[in-house]
Each structure stands twice: as C-alpha cells, then as structure tokens.
Amino acid sequence: MNAFSAGSRKSKKWIFGLVMILVVLICDQLSKYWILNIVHLPEKKSIVTFPFMNFTMVWNTAITFGMLGQLGSWGPVIFTVVALVIASGLFIWMVRSHKIWVTMSLGAIVGGALGNIIDRLRFGAVVDFIHLHVGGWSWYVFNVADSAIVCGVCVLLMDAFFNWGSKT
C-alpha cells in the first residue's frame, strides 16, 4: 500500500465523522427550531404524543439530571467552555481513529455536544423536550443531541469491551 492510498482511506474516514457531526447537528437544531417556533412548546408546556411519550418543555441550565444547577448565571459559561474543550478532544480522537464505527460514534458525540453548546450560547440553557414514561416510571427529559451522545458512548463502550469492528 502506498502513502497516497493510505491517505485516501484516512480522508474517507474523516468524511464519515464529519458527516455524522453535521447530520446530528442539523437534526438537533431543526428539531429544536420546530419545537420552539412551530409547535410553540414553551407556551403549551407539554403535549401528549404517544401513551409512552410526551413533548415536555424543559430549559436545562444544568447538566445531566440537573447536576451542578446551583452555579447560577456562571453555569452556562462554565458548561460551554468545558463542553468545547471535551468536544475538541473528542474531535482529535475522531481524526486519529482507525475504526470507522469509532469515528462515526465520536462524530455523533461531537455533533450532539455542539448542538447543546449552540443552545447554551443562544438561550443560556439547553432545549430539552422528549419525555419518555411508562406507568409510574419516567425518564429525564432530553433532546436529539443527548440521544446522539448516548448512542455514541454506547458504541464506544461496545468497542472497548468487545473490540468491535475492524480497523478500516
């Protein structure tokens, strides 16, 4: 294999990661635009969509499960800076990755992080609206970006534990 074909394969891998970032970011921001500007969920508070799912408006000024919510007005600034640093590190890992599934999962995580960063910069909080529940059980309210982050982390864990996929 010559240097040109190795470089060509690497750039193809980059494209998968970058496409994943863009797909997640676009889907996340479009869904939030739809919820805020077409559905007008902030005014409606909650809409039953299925017996197990509602659209429920939550402005998340903290991090997962409301942790560190006591930081007040500094919270969005601190969370944005930390998220940018982490997303930058994950982007570098994505670029250096040798596995396509790792590259794509890192792209999903970075895209999700960027979607939530955009919210913090625009609104000072993350727009969360998907609320799953069954009987007395209720999951925290989340968004498309959060889903991409969780799915990406699951793929990374599967790769770490089971050495998933080939190095292509």
Image (tube, rainbow, N blue to C red):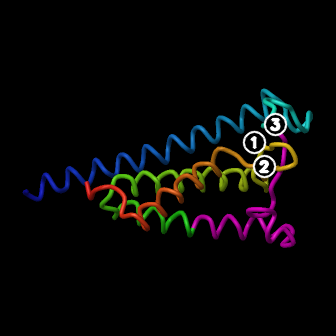
Q: Which residue is mark 1?
A: 130
Query: How crowded is the residue under tag 3: few (<14 C-alpha within 10 Å), some, or many (20+)?
Result: some
The stretch in magenta equals 55-84
At horizontal 71% and vertical 39% (from top left) the residue drawn is 32
- In the rendered structure, are the residues bearing label 2 and label 3 in contact, judged by CB atoms less than 8 Å apart? no
Q: Which residue is mark 2?
A: 141
Residue at the farthest top position: 38
Give the quadrant of residue 97: bottom left
- In the rendered structure, are the residues bearing label 1 and label 3 in contact, judged by CB atoms less than 8 Å apart? no
- Residue 140, labelled with which disc? none
Q: Is residue 81 magenta?
A: yes
N-terminal label among 1 and 2: 1
Q: Which residue is mark 3?
A: 54
Q: Compare residues 41 and 124 and report the one nearer the observer.
A: 41
At horizontal 27% and vertical 51% (from top left) the residue drawn is 11
The amino acid beneath tag 3 is: Asn
Q: Work out which quarter of the rendered image holds the C terminus and state it.
A: bottom left
Give the quadrant of residue 72: bottom right
| Alpha-carbon span between mark 2 and mark 3 | 9 Å
Task: Work out whether 156 lies above or below 15.
Answer: below
Query: How crowded is the residue under tag 2: few (<14 C-alpha within 10 Å), some, or many (20+)?
Result: many
Query: How crowded is the residue under tag 1: few (<14 C-alpha within 10 Å), some, or many (20+)?
Result: many
Q: x and y percent of residue 88 in the render?
A: 50, 65
Tell me if 13 is positioned left or right of 38 in this view.
left
Q: x and y percent of residue 51 in the render?
A: 81, 32
Q: Work out which quarter of the rendered image holds the N terminus and state it.
A: bottom left
- In the rendered structure, are the residues bearing label 1 and label 2 in contact, judged by CB atoms less than 8 Å apart? yes
